[in-house]
Image (cartoon, rainbow, N blue to C red):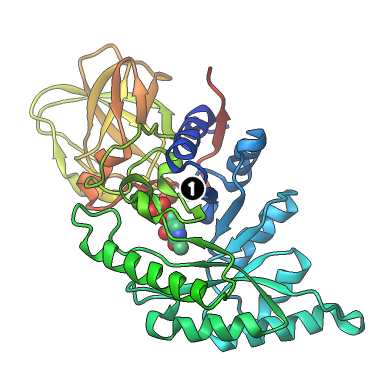
Amino acid sequence: MRPTVALINLSNLKKNYLNIRMKVGPARIMAVVKADAYGHGAKEIVSAFNSLGNKKPEYYAVSICDEAVELRKRKVKQPILVFEPFEKSEAEEVFRYNLISTVFEEEHLNILLKAKRKFEGKKSSSKKTKIHIKVDTGMNRLGVRYEESFKFVEKLNRNKNFLIDGIYTHFATSDELNKDFADFQLKRFKNLLKDLREKNINYGLAHAANSGAILDMPGSYFDMVRPGMILYGYHPSTETTESFPLYPVMSIISRVASIKEIKPEETVGYGRIFTATQKTKIASVPIGYADGFNRNLSNKAKAIINGKIYNEVGRVSMDRITLDVKHDDVKVGDKVTLIGKDNGREICAWDWCKELNTIPYEITCGISNRVPRIYKNYK
Ligand SMILES: Cc1ncc(COP(=O)(O)O)c(C=O)c1O
């Protein structure tokens, strides 16, 4: 196996998850495992959650049909919500794999109805198709517009072909310090639910809270919460409160592949963007931008070897980075921690984010398939 791996700490995953459970009290949990569980490996992450007995998530959520089908093939039993509405070409999978589709337009319902007929053929059943309705309370991306949402739910509730299993909205700014807009969205969602209850209209399970809202908006938990990033051990931004501890789940580890001494004035790598000012040793490490080690980390990233921090120097290439290890006793084969802890030192995804102007989501999702994931339970 390659020496470059992503270690996935399942004990930390479970700690984060159980902390969320404690925080949200009686609310159900829909664990968000889209994008291969934010790069951690959805099948293994779901198996770890499902080992938690009666504490396991009540629902799972993914973005696209293929992700849901993969989980069903792995015998995941919980309901699986697909955030994106189904295309015509894939809608039969809803019935083949017992998936729950998001809907917010008449067209989504037509697609599902046609697919059901096609899938069931002559043996057509009167079983209702479960759906979740997405309400756009201000994100202006997906969802039925708030102003039209009452009518949409009311009409759908009368439709004999469908069962409204849930209704949800998504916050644009729950991870920001200023919660004015998130509170505005929350108020709209609450108003809608109140109006529906007053008219005895079933809407199933109401859910809204993503990571930011779970941390900072306890009034948004409703019947179910939808944690994503906090499962994997990172706050969604630097502006949320640390209302419970989180433990990063992914570490990126490699080994020193070669060491060479260079003289003053010599340069390292493509473009010669690093020039030695004195005699020094350069260690090469087999990770590059094809693995998700972003090229903009050139001359900026750090690495830990034997408990000491070293600078990345020279341009990150497709398969390789180079570290200035000075005159230290660093040897070929020594462990290199690029994200993670070693001997009391730590580099976390946020350290990359500061250089790359991004969020941990993009870092963990960006670690490519070429990097094997190694799963470990620690005591
Ligand atoms: C609809 C929906 N709910 C919940 C989440 C989870 O968000 P987070 O990772 O911020 O908890 C996402 C992710 O973007 C989402 O699209």
Label 1 crowding class (10 Å Cα cut-off): few <14, some 14-19, many 20+? many
Ligand 1's quadrant: bottom left
Residue at label 1?
39
Q: Is residue 254 left or right of residue 205?
A: left
Residue 307 appears in the picture as rendered:
yes
Image point (28%, 11%), residue name:
329
Q: How many marks?
A: 1
Q: Is residue 307 above or below residue 203?
A: above
Q: Relative to the observer, which residue lies in front, 97 or 129?
A: 129
| Residue 44 % position (x, y) | 62, 40
Q: Is residue 249 left or right of residue 359?
A: right
Specify the amino acid type for callout 1: Gly
| Residue 373 % position (x, y) | 54, 37
Q: Relative to the observer, which residue lies in front, 278 or 79?
A: 79
Q: Relative to the observer, which residue lies in front, 132 or 366?
A: 132
Q: Residue furthest front?
A: 198
| Residue 205 % position (x, y) | 56, 61
Image point (10%, 33%), residue name:
265
Q: Relative to the observer, which residue lies in front, 145 or 283?
A: 145
Q: Mark 1: which secondary structure?
A: loop
Q: Is residue 49 above or below residue 11?
A: below
Q: Residue furthest right?
A: 123
| Residue 57 % position (x, y) | 59, 45
- The image quarter in which residue 250 lies: top left
Q: Residue furthest top?
A: 329
- For the N terminus, give its image quadrant: top right
Image point (40%, 48%), residue name:
292
Residue 6 appears in the picture as rendered:
no
**Disc 1 Cβ-to-ligand 1 distance below 8 Å:** no
Image point (54%, 80%), residue name:
153
